[in-house]
Amino acid sequence: MRAWLVERLAGIDALRLAELPDPAAPGAGEVTMAVSAVGLNYPDLLMLSGGYQYKPPLPFTPGMEGVGRIVAVGEGVSGELLGHRLLIGGRTGLLAEQVTLPLATLREVPEALSDAEAAGFTTGALTAWMALAERGRLAAGEHVLVLGAGGGMGLAAVAMAKALGAEVTAAASSLAKLEAARAAGADRLLLLDRDAPDLSTLKGAVDVLFDPVGGPAVGPGLKTLRRGGRYLVIGFVAGAPERVATNLALLKEIEILGVRAGEAGRQDPALGARAMHEIDRIAGGGHLNPAIGLEVPFEQAPEAFRAMQDGTLLGKAVIRVSAG
């Protein structure tokens, strides 16, 4: 089979399409999946240069989330499942034509999602739910500000916040990204300068701030929170983490909360199971269809990584692995 391989930490240029042995035949309780599509996430990009907190041993195959169909079953798994479409997840390993995994680690695909949408669904939706519902304790009617609202993670947060009954202001750096946020359900739109973001019109008006960007928006973002507000730290797309004026947390009695959805589920499996159930339930109602901004064939996977690196991508990048 073919798989994309990272043998040295040198960024996108180090990606190599390799011929590898087929995955091991499925054992008891396992299935082999023909991967249909893989959705990219910012950690996938960071791992190519060793910049993510999880550092897989070399060599590794990137890819955290995808969708596929069962092509072989192991002992104890019904042959009636052959051809069944399922969601696939892992910390790495999915940018391959086939993978063998325990059936218990796979999930049904919400019927509302196409293969491309399913491939790019779980990570964004899971992070948004864990951030807003669990860490942020979002209540219906509260005001959520989403930074980076035109990216895959930001759009997932806009859709999730609306599904949870919030009022949503989407902030992004281009009109095209804001239109994508409007389509995801945003109530208000705010165009920002990446280098000098002005959030003064929202001073003291926000209950929950969802921030996957960091950088120059951190200081202005903190000032948007009303007393008792919650600042959700998702990631640092804009670069290295910023210093935070902790006196603002004291004076306004705000909370600064880190969010690591995958790690939360590993540390608390019951919480992880509940989160997966909730995002699948909400998606089943047609409320979490991810916006696919770029879809490329398997052989052109580096193009999807570059679009994400350039910061011009609207929504999610999806790599088509097979026709299913």
Image (cartoon, rainbow, N blue to C red):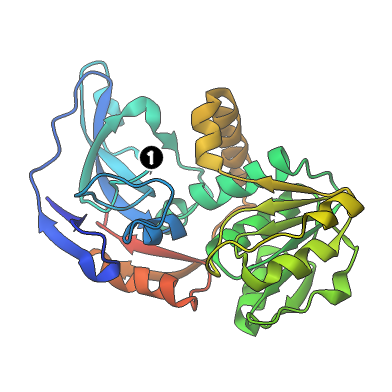
The residue located at (86%, 50%) in the rendering is 250
Front residue of 297/16: it is 16
Q: In this rendering, is residue 275 above or below 65?
A: above
Left or right of 286, for residue 49? left
Q: Is residue 118 above or below residue 46?
A: above
Looking at the image, residue 243 sits to the left or right of residue 280; the answer is right
Residue type at mark 1 is Leu
Residue of label 1 = 86
Using the image, determine if residue 203 lies above or below residue 177: above
* Residue found 91% across the figure and 63% down from its top: 204
Q: Residue at x 22, y 51 (%)?
A: 96
Q: Is disc 1 placed on a helix, strand or loop? A: strand
Where's residue 124, x and y in %? 54, 52
Rendering quarter of residue 153: bottom right
Vertical position of residue 188 compared to residue 132: above or below: below
Q: Residue at x 84, y 46 (%)?
A: 140
Decide if residue 61 is on the left or right side of residue 247. Answer: left
Residue 299 visible to an observer of this rendering: no
Residue 110, percent from left and from top:
51, 43
Please identify the quarter of the rendering in which residue 248 is found.
bottom right
Give coordinates of residue 138: x percent, y percent. Answer: 79, 45
Along the viewing direction, whichever of 218 and 41 lies nearer the viewer = 218
Looking at the rendered structure, the number of numbered marks drawn on it comes to: 1
- Asked if one can make out residue 95 in the rendered structure from this viewpoint, the answer is yes
- Image quarter for residue 170? bottom right
